[in-house]
Amino acid sequence: MARNYSSRKRVLVTGGAGFLGSHLIDRLLDQGHEVLCVDNLFTGTKRNVEHLHNHPRFEFMRHDVCFPLF
C-alpha cells in the first residue's frame, strides 16, 4: 500500500489485459495507485483483469492505442 496520498499515482497501462500488463496492474493497485487499463484484446484477454471489475481504483477501456479516441 502506498504510504501517503501524495505518493499515489494515476497510471495508464497499455496492454493491461495481457500476461505482463495484468500482473503489473495487480502490483500497482496493491501499492495504492489508480490504474486505467487500455487494451484492444488482440493478444490479451479480459479474463486476466476480470477479477478487478469492481475495484474502485481500476478502469478498463477496450481501445487500440494506434487510433485516436476522438
Image (cartoon, rainbow, N blue to C red):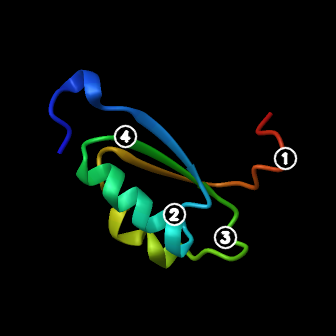
Q: Residue at x 47, y 40 (%)?
A: 11
Q: Disc 3 marks which residue?
A: 41
The nearer-to-camera label among 2 and 1 is 2
* Residue 34: assigned label: 4
Query: Closer to the N terminus: mark 1 or mark 4?
Result: 4
Locate residue 44, reporting x and y percent.
Answer: 62, 74
Residue 64, picture quadrant = bottom right
Query: Closer to the N terminus: mark 2 or mark 1?
Result: 2
Amino acid carrying label 4: it is Glu
Verify CB contact (< 8 Å) between mark 2 and mark 3.
no
Query: Closer to the N terminus: mark 4 or mark 3?
Result: 4
25 to 10, vertically: above or below:
below
Q: In which quadrant of the rendered image does the C terminus lie?
A: top right
Q: Residue at x 70, y 54 (%)?
A: 63
Verify CB contact (< 8 Å) between mark 2 and mark 1.
no
Q: What kind of element bears circle 4?
A: strand
* Residue 67: assigned label: 1
53 to 37, vertically: above or below:
below
From mark 4 to mark 2, how far is it between C-alphas?
A: 14 Å
Amino acid carrying label 2: it is Gly
Locate residue 9, reporting x and y percent.
Answer: 38, 32
* Residue 21: assigned label: 2
Locate residue 6, reporting x and y percent.
Answer: 26, 21
Which of the two residues, 31 or 39, is positioned nearer the viewer here?
Answer: 31
Q: What kind of element bears circle 1?
A: loop
Amino acid carrying label 1: it is Phe
Verify CB contact (< 8 Å) between mark 3 and mark 1.
no
Q: Which residue is drawn at 32% across and 41% down?
A: 33
